[in-house]
Image (cartoon, rainbow, N blue to C red):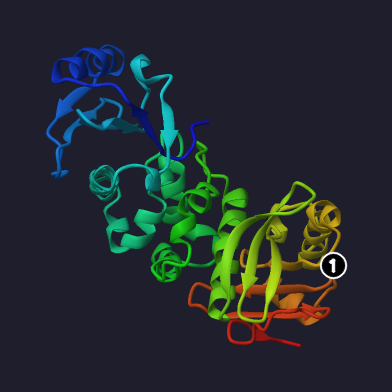
């Protein structure tokens, strides 16, 4: 399975003739590539190339005699670039990153016009929305499955994440966070919903006034999902998302919450040795399932813990177990 889009860098000099011989010709022979005029200017001294394939793949190439060349594509990589190093979006020259993003965003919105209404989300998830294996499944997850929200339309669900992402609080972590959605060639709603639970948790922490940093490595060799900080607080947070009861073997919503939290507690949190807050995100639950949980407020075998459900209109309600060292009342309407 291909990873989220990254650049390949060649330090060599590339002429127009070499581009046609070593890039275009192999792609033309294998998958019917053709060279087309790039849609945008790049600026500076860069020369640019855009290749489109019969199967819908696209590849971009920017070259400069003094700086080498950068390749990005959701297609097969020509053999002349196989041994090149890979770089992230923030590790390449500004002109190259800006031009590549404009080209790919234009293609994305041409193929899925409705995403044009959500520019920051389109940009944030571009590395997976335009990836080799995951471009169909990741877009379909938002379009057909409302990003994991039950009983919700695609637009209200996508707007929820657009409004959070446009705050920019996760921009510095775009590659790792967008990659959580995955690049599988099929929609795995359970896994993808679990990934979006981390975005929901980040939104709640941000709404409560905390700065968040994702993927915190701890001494056990594990990574916990977030560190939440303010002037007086430094707390680790781990997020889990129970599956809706009708898609799992658990007998009902109460058991679903307990079993999912127990799995997390006996795994990463047990290895960590305590101190982290467990967030149990029930946003995949429909009203009847959540009403059962909110009525009983079951324990989750880890303290401190916060159990909650968020709806795409922004409303969040939940309950706490143990002494939670985070002030979340500005973000969650607590039942306790």
Residue to which mark 1 is pinned: 302
Residue at position x 41%, y 24% in the image = 84
Density class for disc 1 (Cα within 10 Å; few <14, some 14-19, many ≥20) is many
Relative to 167, 63 lies left or right: left
Residue 250 falls in which quadrant of the image?
A: bottom right
Asked if residue 56 can be seen in this view, the reply is no
For the image, the number of numbered tags is 1
Residue 19, placed above or below residue 101: above
Relative to 248, 61 lies left or right: left
Residue at position x 20%, y 15% in the image = 18
Disc 1 element:
loop
Q: Position of residue 65 (x, y in %)?
A: 19, 28
Residue 213 falls in which quadrant of the image?
A: bottom right
Of residue 14 and residue 108, the one placed in the foreground of this image is 14
Asked if residue 290 can be seen in this view, the reply is yes
Of residue 146 and residue 118, the one placed in the foreground of this image is 118
Q: Position of residue 132 (x, y in %)?
A: 41, 33
Residue 206 falls in which quadrant of the image?
A: bottom right
Of residue 331 and residue 241, the one placed in the foreground of this image is 331
Residue 186, placed above or below residue 254: above
Residue at position x 81%, y 58% in the image = 269
Residue at position x 48%, y 60% in the image = 146
Relative to 115, 179 lies left or right: right
Relative to 272, 49 lies left or right: left
Q: Position of residue 131 (x, y in %)?
A: 41, 38
Residue 128, placed above or below residue 247: above
Q: Position of residue 118 (x, y in %)?
A: 33, 62
Q: Specify the quadrant that holds the C terminus.
A: bottom right
């Amino acid at each position: 399975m291909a990873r989220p889009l990254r650049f390949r860098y060649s330090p060599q000099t590339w002429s127009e003739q070499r581009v046609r011989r070593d890039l275009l010709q192999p792609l033309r022979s294998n998958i019917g590539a053709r060279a087309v005029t790039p849609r945008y200017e790049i600026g500076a001294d860069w020369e640019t190339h855009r290749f489109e394939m019969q199967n819908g793949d696209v590849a971009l190439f920017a070259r400069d005699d003094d700086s080498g060349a950068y390749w990005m594509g959701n297609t097969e990589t020509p053999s002349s670039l196989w041994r090149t190093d890979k770089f992230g979006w923030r590790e390449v020259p500004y002109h190259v990153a800006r031009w590549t993003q404009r080209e790919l965003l234009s293609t994305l919105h041409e193929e899925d016009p409705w995403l044009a209404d959500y520019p920051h989300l389109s940009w944030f998830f571009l590395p997976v929305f335009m990836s080799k294996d995951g471009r169909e499944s990741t877009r379909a997850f938002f379009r057909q499955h409302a990003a994991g929200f039950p009983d919700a339309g695609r637009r209200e669900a996508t707007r929820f994440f657009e409004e959070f992402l446009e705050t920019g609080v996760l921009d510095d972590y775009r590659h790792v966070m967008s990659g959580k959605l995955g690049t599988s060639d099929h929609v795995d709603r359970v896994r993808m919903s679990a990934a979006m639970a981390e975005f929901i948790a980040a939104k709640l922490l941000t709404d409560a006034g905390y700065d968040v940093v994702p993927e915190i490595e701890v001494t056990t060799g594990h990574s916990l999902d977030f560190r939440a900080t303010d002037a007086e607080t430094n707390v680790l947070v781990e997020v889990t998302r129970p599956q809706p009861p009708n898609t799992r073997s658990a007998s009902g919503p109460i058991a679903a919450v307990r079993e999912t939290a127990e799995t997390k507690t006996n795994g990463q949190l047990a290895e960590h040795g305590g101190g982290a807050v467990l967030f149990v995100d029930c946003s995949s639950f429909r009203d009847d399932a959540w009403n059962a949980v909110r009525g009983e407020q079951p324990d989750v075998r880890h303290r401190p813990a916060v159990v909650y459900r968020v709806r795409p209109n922004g409303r969040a309600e939940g309950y706490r177990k143990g002494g939670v060292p985070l002030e979340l009342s500005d973000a969650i309407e607590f039942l306790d």
